[in-house]
Amino acid sequence: MQMTTVLQVSGLTKTYSRKGETFKAVNNISFTVGGGEIVGVLGPNGSGKTTTLKSICGLTGVDAGEIRLNRDVAATDQRSLKQHIGAVLEGARNVYWRLTPSENIVYFAGLKGVGRKDAKLRAEELITILALSEYRDQEVRMLSKGNQQKVAIACALVHRPCLILLDEPTLGLDVDMVRGMKSWLRTVVDSGQSAMMITSHDMDFIEAICDRVVILYRGEIVSENSVAELRSRYAPQKTFLLQVQGCLSPDVKRTLQQDGWAVEESENSSQLSLRTHDLLLLSSSLNALTHCGAVLTDINVSSDTLEDIFVHAVQGDPANEPAQAPTKGPAETAEAGKIS
């Protein structure tokens, strides 16, 4: 089934001036987002994420390039954009604190051209989906930060937009809320064949919900792939940790070390570690341990996190060693570790 293009960005360029100097916040980027697709947008501070999202909403003018929704609505057409886009760009700032969740949703529905009767029905639907029923008559200012965030998202979804932009949607949400959000955001996108773009510090959330990830660095797209494709390119290896009862014989230890295993021995056990994508080598090593009578007491397998992969991508270096997000060092390296 062919995917319908909801958002098309072509050659987007935006230049700012700061202290007498000009710099390109976004430099000739192009991408598309299809109906039913959720795309994550990642990048260090200053990489161009916010400029890109605000340009799509028509909130920021651009120097060059074109942004189109459904192939015909241009980003300069503010009236049409309101009918096609739902956005939460800065937390819960798009709601009125002294209105209730229901009143907020109905109010914003009216701004988007939804009739009052339909707005009330849609408000009830969203309040139920977002588990806000017990808070429907409380002023938003009295709600927890997580529930305020849910009200903001409900206001952005009330008119069933074809494009949904969410900036840090999990901010302030507990684990159960985030788990529920994964489910209903996916349902919203699939049922309406909407397109969605998400920025988030929550890498587990991005990995779980996004079909693709666009990584921006210094105003340019450095990667645009699925998480699986990112792993294949930047982190194809896994780290295996084996715990073995007792100490290994010198011959077995030597053989394992020749195969790349690091061996650490204590009085009562041995720990073996290996980073590889070669499962045949792992199988051979396990057979060697079994053959010599070694007793395996524990095994652990781990992969690089999406944050590790992100750091490799912005540095342009496929990973061969376990990645560590930098905390100190050159400014460029430190910037790569700050995801926002």
Image (tube, helix red, strand yellow):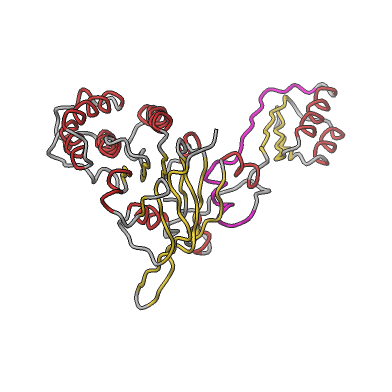
Q: Quadrant of residue 50?
A: bottom left
- Residue 21 in percent (x, y) is at 39, 76
Query: From which residue to which does the magenta span run?
Result: 294-317
The count of marks equals 0
User: Does the magenta-highlighted stretch encompass residue 304?
Assistant: yes
Near-viewer residue (299 or 118): 118
The reply, left or right, for residue 116 in relation to residue 15 is left
Near-viewer residue (295 or 330): 330
The reply, left or right, for residue 119 in relation to residue 32 is left
Location of residue 142 with respect to 333 vertically, above or below? above
Q: Residue furthest right?
A: 251
User: Does the magenta-highlighted stretch encompass residue 211?
Assistant: no
Location of residue 60 with respect to 148 vertically, above or below? below
Q: Residue at x 27, y 23 (%)?
A: 128
Near-viewer residue (301 or 78): 78
Q: Residue furthest front?
A: 72
Q: Residue at x 71, y 37 (%)?
A: 264
Q: Residue at x 28, y 34 (%)?
A: 150
- Residue 250 in percent (x, y) is at 85, 35
Q: Residue at x 36, y 56 (%)?
A: 55
Quarter of the rendering occupied by the N terminus? top right
